[in-house]
Image: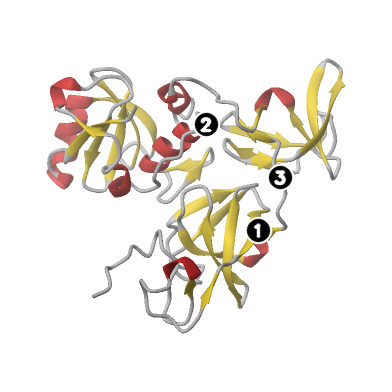
């Protein structure tokens, strides 16, 4: 009897599946997929090729994927960074390119040239990956230029492989007041589990995308052991402990990333989602 697989993390359909799943799933055809990268600032990943379907997660500029299928303007892909599977608009894909830098501030602008007085042509989120060619200066401001001549503020970029902080909570705090967005995973809109994942990724640490996956990571602890960096889980929700008494989380109550006393959060959330389901320490 074949074991049930999570469609979020395994690419399989009756007609097509990832070749690595041969023998685990029944499918008409198995493929290895082709390499591609995300070519727009933020691309929504959905459970079906339908723009009216809700967003499962988002992929950021420069993140890489394997493409298993392209049809009717949609691409069925698996993200390399966390293994998430879904459909995105085919127009969001670009040819592979080795990134040199990652955006290290919640949001920044892409300019048509190294000149901050020019109207920006795009806005990029923390975690976006770019290939830069040179560093130039205009009136004392340093820029990194891309192959097409566009430019980013150099101080808003970090070399790939270099950690932004040794403390991922320090990264998460930078998203305070960022709007809450179900399925969001960027500095323009983010959900509870993406706040955890994206903050950890800026330390070079891979972490699962959804809260139920994250609840299996790390080590279980007791409530009275909570300290900075520990995670508190409810059914369908996760928050980060900023200190022993303060929870930092993207939430649908304030519709932002916000601080909240843990006791107040437990009492407020309890009427709908009951008590916390667990506490985890990630080290």
Which residue lies under the disc numbered 3?
98
Graded by Cα atoms within 10 Å as few (under 14), some (14 to 19) or many (20 or more), the crowding at tag 3 reads few
Q: Are marks 3 and 1 in contact (CB under 8 Å)?
A: no
Task: State the CA–CA distance, disc 3 to disc 1.
Answer: 11 Å
Q: Quadrant of residue 111?
A: top right
Residue lying at 48% horizontally and 44% vertically, measured from the top left:
185
Helix, strand or loop status at disc 3 = loop
- Residue under pointer 1: 36
**Looking at the image, is mark 3 or mark 2 earlier in the sequence?**
3
* Residue 255 higher or lower than 25, as above or below: above
Quadrant assignment for the N terminus: bottom left
Q: Quadrant of the C terminus?
A: top left
Percent of width and height locating residue 244: 24, 17
Q: Position of residue 8 (x, y in %)?
A: 39, 60
Q: Quadrant of residue 259?
A: top left
**Residue closest to the eye, 2 or 196:** 2
Q: Which mark is residue 264?
A: none
Residue in the image at 86% along x and 22% along y: 138
Badge number at residue 202: 2
Relative depth, front residue between 251 and 68:
68
Q: If you read the primary sequence from the N terminus, does the residue marked by circle 2 or circle 1 appear first? A: 1
**Pointer 3 with pointer 2, Cβ within 8 A:** no
69 relative to 239, above or below: below
């Amino acid at each position: 009897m074949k074991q049930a697989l999570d469609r979020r993390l395994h690419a399989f359909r009756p007609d097509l599946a990832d070749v690595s799943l041969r023998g685990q799933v029944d499918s008409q055809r198995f493929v290895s997929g082709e390499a591609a990268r995300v070519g727009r600032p933020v691309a929504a990943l959905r459970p079906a090729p339908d723009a009216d379907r809700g967003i499962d997660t988002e992929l950021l500029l420069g993140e890489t994927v394997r493409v298993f299928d392209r049809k009717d303007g949609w691409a069925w892909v698996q993200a390399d960074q966390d293994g998430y599977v879904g459909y995105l608009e085919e127009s969001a894909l670009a040819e592979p390119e080795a990134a040199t830098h990652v955006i290290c501030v919640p949001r920044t602008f892409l300019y048509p040239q190294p000149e901050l007085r020019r109207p920006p042509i795009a806005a990029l989120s923390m975690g976006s990956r770019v290939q830069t060619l040179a560093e130039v200066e205009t009136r004392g401001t340093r820029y990194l230029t891309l192959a097409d001549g566009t430019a980013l503020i150099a101080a808003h970029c970090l070399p790939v492989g270099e950690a932004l902080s040794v403390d991922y909570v320090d990264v998460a705090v930078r998203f305070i007041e960022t709007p809450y967005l179900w399925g969001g995973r960027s500095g323009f809109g983010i959900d509870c589990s993406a706040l955890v994942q994206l903050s950890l990724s800026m330390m070079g640490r891979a972490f699962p995308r959804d809260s139920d996956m994250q609840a299996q990571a790390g080590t279980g602890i007791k409530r009275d052991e909570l300290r900075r960096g520990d995670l508190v889980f409810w059914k369908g929700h996760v928050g980060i402990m900023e200190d022993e008494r303060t929870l930092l989380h993207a939430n649908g109550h304030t519709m932002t990333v916000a601080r909240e006393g843990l006791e107040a959060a437990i009492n407020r959330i309890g009427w709908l989602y009951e008590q916390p389901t667990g506490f985890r320490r990630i080290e």
